[in-house]
Image: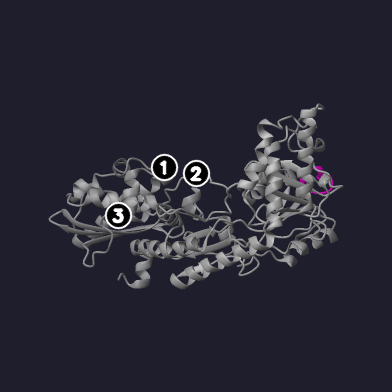
Amino acid sequence: MYTDQVMDHFTNPRNVGVIEDADGVGEVGNVKCGDIMRIYLKIEDDVITDIKFKTFGCGSAIASSSIATVMIKGKTVDEALALTNKDFVGALGGLPSVKLHCSVLAEEAFKVAVYDYCQKSGKSYAGLEGFDPANADDDHHDHGDEDEE
Amino acid sequence: MKRVYLDYSATTPTKKEVLDAMLPYFSEVFGNPSSIHGFGREAKKVVNESRATIAGFMNADEKELYFTAGGTESDNWAVKGAAKALKNKGNHIITSKIEHHGILHTCESLEKEGFEVTYLDVDGDGLISLEALEAAIKPETVLISIMFVNNEIGTLQPIKEIGAIAKAHGVLFHTDAVQAFGNFKIDVKDMNIDLMSISSHKIYGPKGIGALYIRKGVRLVNFVDGGAQERKKRAGTENVPSIVGFAKAAEIAYRDFDAHVEKLVALRERLRKGVMETIDYCKYNGHPDQRHPGNAHFAFEFIEGEALLLSLDLVGIAGSSGSACTSGSLDPSHVLMAIGLKHEIAHGSLRLSVGDFTTEEDIDYTIKELKTIVERLRMMSPLYDKVTGGK
């Protein structure tokens, strides 16, 4: 069902935790759908020096959060904003189609965190132009087949 | 790695005794029961002996039991067959919100053909209300279909009382007894059951074989058309080895009934107590005592069921969950919604079902591993932060 990379990031997730004095925090998803992702950012001179996450969700939601933090950490904000969910899925060696929304959540949680940073710092980034966190909670689920017994 | 199978409600291993009983019916006694020659006659004989064996365990006549390809086919046949046979009398069916998809999707299919279906609510323990059932009966009602035991939360319905209401109103009563047969004593006459679905692979028999009990005098439209097998009601060459296996499994189930139930209840209670005592923010679902002997159903707050199942699988433990992420749909299972669980709690659901090969060591190992896994997932959960203050 899942690739080795997904299982690796699920069983040994990188960057789990909280940054108490975060420069930006983003949370997307809702309990109704069964996945919530929260990302904390530390930003210095437009570089993401630290990133942590907390996720309530399935294996692919946790793995998507983990791989996203690994790929984002150390990049400039502009470089990181250029990453999309497809990059995370690629790095995980793929996700089942019904789980692709998990990778979208990771991308959006990061963008919401950067948006939060922009609100606090007065900065703006081209990669965030037109981004509205109010739309980030939209449902990205696909309906799949039900497993039966 | 230690492997612990706690998903007996999904399926059971075929017992050695059952397999041994089946083996001669592949290559030695292989005739087609419909053939008039000796090869056919010996196959026919064992099919009917098997039928009588199984019918005996529900106090039915052997002529009232028809073999099918499994519980889902039996459900389809009973509901569609009764509805269509009685469509001149009425077009209304009563069922519950917690039925197996074999019933629910069959009812939805009939709704598209113009039938009207009432889906009864259940209470927090998963029980239907007998008053609500009686109130739902109309002159057009032709069938009541209520499951004997729920497959997710294990709740046992008051079948005899439902049968009495159906009888008093002259309405047919079908019950999906797939999880009940072999785990409860069933008497179709005493319980006023007109139609009943059962399955072999839930009771340590082979997969792909089930049966429908049809009370003498009840007419159904056929579901599988073709040859004259099963008294012209269910076409297709009989699955002789599996029929033999099903009968042997039923025989063992009722031969060892008391020991089986006692063992499962003891293991299930050990599991329930162990989990409830060691893990906080956990809810035990289903009726406290009117339930399947092997079923334990938990919901852990702040975590998601698929992550839980994956983690358990990594330490060799097999369970199941009604979380949306395990079904690929948006919502958690319809059963968990029907008993009134909030989405966030239902997403953290875990069904562990014990069986004849479960040991106390399996249970203790599971309790220990489960505690570690739940803690690990909670440490990653932003919802748990809100409880612990992020510490």
Q: Give whichever of B177, B79 is nearer the camera.
A: B177
Q: Quadrant of residue A2?
A: top left
Q: Residue at x 69, y 62 (%)?
A: B157
Query: In the rendered structure, which segment of residues is drawn in magenta?
Result: B82-90
| Sequence order check, earlier mark of 3 and 1 | 3
Task: Tell me if mark 2 has few (under 14), some (14-19) or many (20+) residues whose alpha carbon lies within 10 angstroms of its own.
Answer: some
Does residue B88 show up magenta in the picture?
yes
* Mark 3–mark 1 distance (CA, rounded to whole Å): 19 Å
Relative height, residue B123 to residue A79 (above, below): below
| Sequence order check, earlier mark of 2 and 1 | 1
Q: Give whichever of A84, A123 is nearer the camera.
A: A84
| Sequence order check, earlier mark of 3 and 2 | 3
Q: Looking at the picture, which amino acid does disc 3 mark?
A: Pro
The numbered dot on residue A144 is 2
Q: Give whichever of A109, B256 is nearer the camera.
A: B256
The numbered dot on residue A13 is 3
* Labels 3, 2: front one: 3
Location of mark 1 (residue): A96
